[in-house]
Amino acid sequence: MEIKPQATQELRPYKTSIDIGHSKSGSDHVLIIKSMKVHSDDPVETLQIVEAMLKRLDAIIAGDE
């Protein structure tokens, strides 16, 4: 009987995640970023991803998306 190795698939976490919540600032209700995570070994790429995430979030809040 021949034993064949089984391929195992590693579960990779998402490259980015963002957690948004509501808060009260005086009498106003505002959106806040509770956490933002970027997984990358390249600092330049990390900053580019963060910038893109913030621009996209701004567009969503403004109603452009």
Image (cartoon, grey):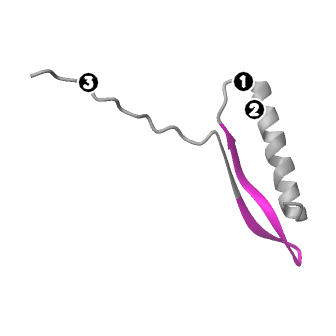
- Can residue 22 be found in the magenta stretch? yes
**How many numbered marks appear?**
3
Label 3 neighbourhood size at 10 Å, few (<14), some (14-19), many (20+)?
few
Q: Which residue is mark 2?
A: 46
Any mark on residue 42, and which?
1
Q: Is residue 58 above or below residue 26?
A: above
Please report the residue visible at 79 percent of the width from the left and 46 percent of the height from the top: 53
Q: Is residue 50 above or below residue 60?
A: above
Mark 2 vs 3, N-terminal side: 3
Q: Nearer the viewer, mark 2 or mark 3?
A: 3
| Kind of element beneath mark 2 | helix
The kind of residue on which mark 3 rests is Pro
Mark 2 and mark 1 in contact? Answer it, CB < 8 Å: yes
| Kind of element beneath mark 3 | loop
- Can residue 10 be found in the magenta stretch? no
Please report the residue visible at 84 percent of the width from the left and 68 percent of the height from the top: 30
Label 2 neighbourhood size at 10 Å, few (<14), some (14-19), many (20+)?
some
Q: The magenta stretch spans which residues?
A: 20-38
The quarter of the displayed image where residue 7 is located: top left
Please report the residue visible at 41 percent of the width from the left and 34 percent of the height from the top: 9
The quarter of the displayed image where residue 6 is located: top left
Seen as rendered, the residue at the extreme bottom is: 27
Marks 1 and 3 sit apart, C-alpha to C-alpha, by 34 Å
| Kind of element beneath mark 1 | loop
Mark 2 and mark 3 in contact? Answer it, CB < 8 Å: no
Marks 2 and 1 sit apart, C-alpha to C-alpha, by 6 Å
The kind of residue on which mark 1 rests is Asp
Q: Which residue is mark 3?
A: 5
